[in-house]
Image (spheres, helix red, strand yellow):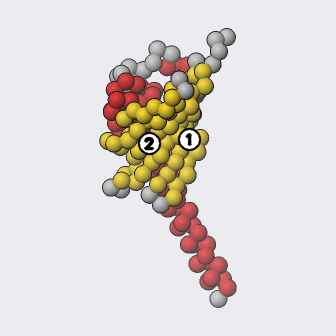
Amino acid sequence: MKKSLLLFIFALFAVTAAAQQSEEEAVRIPLENYLKAHATGDPAYARKAFYKEGKLISIKDGKYTVEDFDAFITRAFTGKPAADEALRKAGRKIVSIDITGNAAIAKIVLDYPTVKWTDYMTLLKIDGEWKIVNKSYFAEWKKKQ
């Protein structure tokens, strides 16, 4: 009896862990598309990552700013990689993901030669697909060497 109960508990734990892992893999899809948009400059990757309605929220020059995703994508992803793309590659990473039900948050760091961006993404599972619905960031500008 004890052995059966232990096997049941182990199986339940394994199924729960596998479901969480596959959910994390699903959350990574829009985050990886966001990173591909940065690498290539291709706005199509950004449009795959972000939900059609959402906001980029930041503090710029000491003031709270909000920009909708369409304006952000149009401004930031011009169809070409950045001139210093070769120096940027190694600096992109997903630092953390936290999922509860159909909501998730993620932290991404883009450590580039002149600036280190720390992005905080809010994601929701909408119609079975994870999408970024809000982005907040902090820019840490580097001094020239």
Q: Residue at x 40, y 54 (%)?
A: 125
Comparing 32 with 120, the one in front is 120
Q: Residues within 10 Å of mark 2 (few under 14, many from 20)?
A: many
Disc 1 target residue: 107
Q: Tell me residue 121's x, y (percent).
A: 49, 42
Q: Tell me residue 12's x, y (percent).
A: 56, 72
Quarter of the image where the C terminus is located = top right
Going by the image, does 66 lie left or right of 62? left
Disc 2 target residue: 134
Q: Amino acid at mark 2?
A: Asn
Q: Name the secondary structure under disc 2.
A: strand
Q: Amino acid at mark 1?
A: Lys
Q: Tell me residue 58's x, y (percent).
A: 50, 33
Comparing 73 with 54, the one in front is 54
Q: Tell me residue 118's x, y (percent).
A: 57, 33
Q: How many marks?
A: 2
Q: Is residue 112 above or below residue 127?
A: above
